[in-house]
Amino acid sequence: KERAAASFNPELLTHVLDGSPENTRRRREIENLILKDPDFQHEDLNFLSRSQRYEVAVRKSATMVEKMRKFNIADPAEIMWFKKLHLVNFVEPVGLNYSMFIPTLLNQGTTAQQEKWLLSSKGLEIIGTYAQTEMGHGQSGPLDLHLGMFLPTLLHQATEEQQERFFMPAWNLEIIGTYAQTEMGHGTHLRGLETTATYDPETQEFILNSPTVTSIKWWPGGLGKTSNHAIVLAQLITQGKCYGLHAFIVPIRELGTHKPLPGITVGDIGPKFGYDEMDNGYLKMDSYRIPRENMLMKHAQVKPDGTYVKPLSNKLTYGTMVFIRSFLVGESARCLSKACTIAIRYSAVRHQSEITPGEPEPQILDYQTQQYKLFPLLATAYAFQFVGAYMKETYHRINEDISQGDLSELPEVCVMSRSLLHALAAGLKAFTSWTTNTGIEACRMACGGHGYSHCSGLPNIYVNFTPTCTFEGENTVMMLQTARFLMKSYDQVHSGKLVCGMVSYLNDLPSQHIQPQQHTLKSWDGAMGASVARGEGTSTSDHFLELQLVEIAAKNLQTEVIHRKSKEVAWNLTSVDLVQASEAHCHYVAVKLFSEKLLQIQEKSIQAVLRNLCLLYSLYGISRNAGDFLQGSIMTESQITQVNERIKELLTVIRPDAVALVDAFDFQDVTLGSVLGRYDGNVYENLFEWAKKSPLNKTEVHESYHKHLKSLQSKL
Amino acid sequence: KERAAASFNPELLTHVLDGSPENTRRRREIENLILKDPDFQHEDLNFLSRSQRYEVAVRKSATMVEKMRKFNIADPAEIMWFKKLHLVNFVEPVGLNYSMFIPTLLNQGTTAQQEKWLLSSKGLEIIGTYAQTEMGHGQSGPLDLHLGMFLPTLLHQATEEQQERFFMPAWNLEIIGTYAQTEMGHGTHLRGLETTATYDPETQEFILNSPTVTSIKWWPGGLGKTSNHAIVLAQLITQGKCYGLHAFIVPIRELGTHKPLPGITVGDIGPKFGYDEMDNGYLKMDSYRIPRENMLMKHAQVKPDGTYVKPLSNKLTYGTMVFIRSFLVGESARCLSKACTIAIRYSAVRHQSEITPGEPEPQILDYQTQQYKLFPLLATAYAFQFVGAYMKETYHRINEDISQGDLSELPEVCVMSRSLLHALAAGLKAFTSWTTNTGIEACRMACGGHGYSHCSGLPNIYVNFTPTCTFEGENTVMMLQTARFLMKSYDQVHSGKLVCGMVSYLNDLPSQHIQPQQHTLKSWDGAMGASVARGEGTSTSDHFLELQLVEIAAKNLQTEVIHRKSKEVAWNLTSVDLVQASEAHCHYVAVKLFSEKLLQIQEKSIQAVLRNLCLLYSLYGISRNAGDFLQGSIMTESQITQVNERIKELLTVIRPDAVALVDAFDFQDVTLGSVLGRYDGNVYENLFEWAKKSPLNKTEVHESYHKHLKSLQSKL
């Protein structure tokens, strides 16, 4: 019905999204492996209490470990494999939906490495698959931080001796660890952490203390009930002097009984918006002593007498944060794609009201207002897919350049490409996660009343996605990081140097007063198509906007610097402009990457449908920011009018392809977790079946009737 | 600390919000009555399962009924009081957070009536208080629809005989009823309902059927487990002919045992995003017979032989829908005010990062980006408070005009004021609920990581508010209703007639080409202040925007009408423009009402602080829609630049008053339900106390450890 009307074969588009037909094949193979494994049967967590959900999650983690053992992954060779890969870890503050670590191994390795991991060991494949599939469900587990942070940190920061002591027990799950960084009163700003580790040379121990209520460790995943060890970040004090943050391995529960140790107060931080199955925890330490050897001393050291030995370099590994943020861009794309899949499929199934009286209720998807809600989001989901893929590629390319040492061979002006990626990852993480966050809710509300039921799957997608806006760097802080880079580049151009890469549009700055372009939109639109065809990638007028916003922010910053007492105060008083400049920059990057992607596509039917989406994404962005475009005289009023008209035309053009476009995301029903978004469109019967499973339906008559209502009725 | 810095006394502002010091006093009195009643002790539902929450809700409802009985409200005089007031009911599709009915009585009566109800009967006061306070918590209860829909419908549509038969048992809770309208496949569009009631003259019964899966009644609150009767809306078929929707009283559970009756399938529809304590239900009927006398026959009738007797008028009562939608505008204001209170107080408590290196971490509220997130929302909350108050007053004024029959004395041109209110209520319900919906989430994310915990109270405010966007008329549909009125008014002006009230700006249409105003913003801003002072209420330039958007929509509609086969198709193809015109209109109304409110305030310090908020609300709206203002040449580019500068200045001006401004909303801590938003700012210690109550902390070691982890550890 809907699918027959499409102008293209969605399978071909799926190949584009996966990168190649081979990738599609392998992804499906892995997915099916786990989806068909009876040990990993998917339960509907919606019907369970938090305690039950936690138990399911622990059970699944345990099953995974059983599988590992069954396939004998505890042998030293395989552990070496794990050790080698520890670089791909991540510094994670707040209950990160990890399940990221092992998929990372799968995603981030070279093809040769992937071959090895995937094909050489059945067991690893299953772990990888498990984690990847769970991640596909947006689910988190109590062992996430054990695998994702505790083990990698051990490998990264522990001495050889410490690795001997802790790694094998941790690998075997005798030691279950987590990574305790954030405190109740302190998040993004690491230097503000208050936990102290004071060295006592007499006993050769560190005395750990949570001196205030705000210093209680708060949020780490798996800390509440699951872990018996934690890597604790604390201010190191020795010989009366504070040397800043260092990491310590702290036993928190007794082996064998799992009871909290004396001096340790540990527990669950309570129910949250989502992440029900995760025991995010708190940890309070009162003069709690650990041996000197439990400080992670690969870099900095404290000698037995208390002498502090500085690390050679106290820089964090480049790449870790960049990697996670790049990953989160892809995660945004996945979640928005899921939400669009559900909302668009259900809008094709759902009939409501009437356009013309007397005729049957039309599909909701035929209403222009519904198309206007969903199709720009669909276009955005595709844009983010390509942005995510670009970030992943760039990260690897730069990392390979570094490891091959050919950094010096790059043209001088482009040495900053690494810091550019760093800045880009911050901004794009914020830009894509904010957009996705509101987009998921827009999709949910576009499903009408049923969107509000957990049967739609959308509330879960939302609550598990929304922390992305605050963790791994709060979004506004991220936007300001990108802005700092833009301002630096701006200064550089002003001092006569050229900049390259994604900010090269700033090189156009000297010709500041851009003339309004007098050609009509059709020709502009055509120009975009032409530039796409010629390989220029993006429209000519588009980047003038970022240019202008960067300039406004820079000028306002200069003005404030002149008037205010300090540069820092000026920065704060310009920050609203700075965030806007970053947003415009990120939007520019997304449009540019999307239109560049079009050039790589051979298949005409796919190129045509993606071009429509790219155009919609770009024009919708212009329409929503028409003020900025007009104010800079980047576009004329009549062009804006044409943009708005063209958007409405595009809605009609995309309509017949809409269902096929979401099919191409290739989510299996169990991954979507949505009755409304079922592939077969058989929504209503399954909705009824789903509702019957509600725990309130377990008994015909709820006990409250007997307890509270019946007595009222009989008392009369 | 924060409070000492304020430029005004928040108590005085509270009086403005309540309408008078007397209203403030009475509101507090009522609140304290219930908050201090040990029988209504507030429990933290966050720690309970859905089944437990449902039970708490049933228990509370039962307690309320006990109180009623204790105070002997079952006496006939008091029931008459209830009967008289039944007009204030509401037609409600989807799980409305009712708890609205009784507060309505309290809010909507004349002062004399309120005196009577509140003071004459201790018992009624307690019911009213109960409901109002529960509503303050955003909580719903299983008996909501019994009180809110079932009883009023009985009074409104039942014959005398039926009232005799059903009212007293329902009042005494022998009959517990709900109102079953929406079906699984049918929401807003009533004519699409599929449930049938076929009359059988032989047995003088109606045979009720749910002929398809989509016809299953779905969503009614209290239907799943609580009710033993439902008022069912069904297509009436008699003598082979369908007469459209009629209401029937349908017994669904057996009295005494509460078991579903044969032919009835009833249950809970499953977990939702929020409303955990509400048993929204489904109802499927298979050739289920009810006596002829169970059709509500006050208006239409079916004679024993099956003859259908038409009702005298088949118009729904004017006012019901308008009343609910007006109420929801106030509800938006309340929820946004709550969210702002939490986020602003916590932002004053929370310290993070640094503006100037080396200095202590500043309060989050000192960051410009944080102010830019929260202060426009604060201004919006105030605007919506005044819009809500206006809607309530206007509703009453018009209703009184109607009842006093002096409608004919109004100038001819203003007869449409009733349909204006109708149109306004639809649009403003959509406008305020959309804004509030995103605003609550913006507040939550402005609280950083802790916003994600249920301790912030914000997730609950959000999930219980968000249905407002889809129920009582889906928002986009509501916006289009307003647009229909705007288009009608536009046509009227074009045909030479004048329009009045909130759309009177359309009278300016003939002078279509408005010249850009050359004065700078300072003078514009001054002009607004001056016009406020002079009593003109709003800025001169502001309404040109709506004028223009209405005109664009109208012209696009005309163009489409010329090109398309039908008016209806043209309407659909213009609907994006139409929604935009409505939004602009609603924003105009809000600005206008806010600035008119300023004139009524005598106290200088209050007027000054509210003027800043009003200005911020208005300028922020311009800034966000700068494209529209520029495109219509309503404002120049340099004016827009000045608007943006002025907004940043206002953030700094409002900063010292921010905490006092949220204090003036006068929410008690228990009503906010937020650890972060506590009045005393003692956040962190209470956060720790709160977390300790988490159910996962009931045992030191969770059973999952013994079940799943321990065996893994020992198996090695």
Image: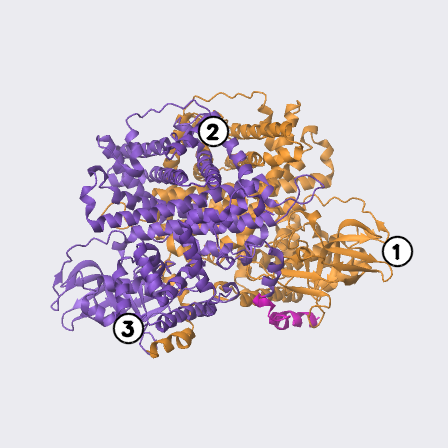
Chain colours: A purple, B orange
Q: Chain of mark 3?
A: A
Tell me where the magenta segment starts and ends, as one range. Answer: A693-716
Q: Predominant secondary structure in magenta?
A: helix
Q: Which mark is residue A8?
A: none
Horizontal placement of B513 versus B485: left or right? left
- The amino acid beneath tag 2 is Ile
Mark toward the viewer: 2 or 1:
2
Residue at numbered disc 1 = B305
Residue B711, image x and y in percent?
Answer: 38, 78
Q: Quadrant of residue B395?
A: top right
Mark 1 closeness class: few <14, some 14–19, many ≥20 residues within 10 Å = few
Mark toward the viewer: 1 or 3:
3
> Are the residues flagged by discs 1 and 3 from a single subunit?
no
Q: CA distance from mark 1 to mark 3?
A: 84 Å
Which residue occupies the foreground of this view, A320 or A602? A602
- The amino acid beneath tag 1 is Asp
Q: Quadrant of residue B651?
A: top left
The secondary element bearing badge 3 is classed as: helix
Res. B436 in view:
yes
Q: Is residue B504 magenta?
A: no
The secondary element bearing badge 2 is classed as: helix
Label 1 near label 2: C-beta < 8 Å?
no
Residue at numbered disc 2 = A640
- The amino acid beneath tag 3 is Pro
Q: Chain of mark 1?
A: B
Residue at numbered disc 3 = A169
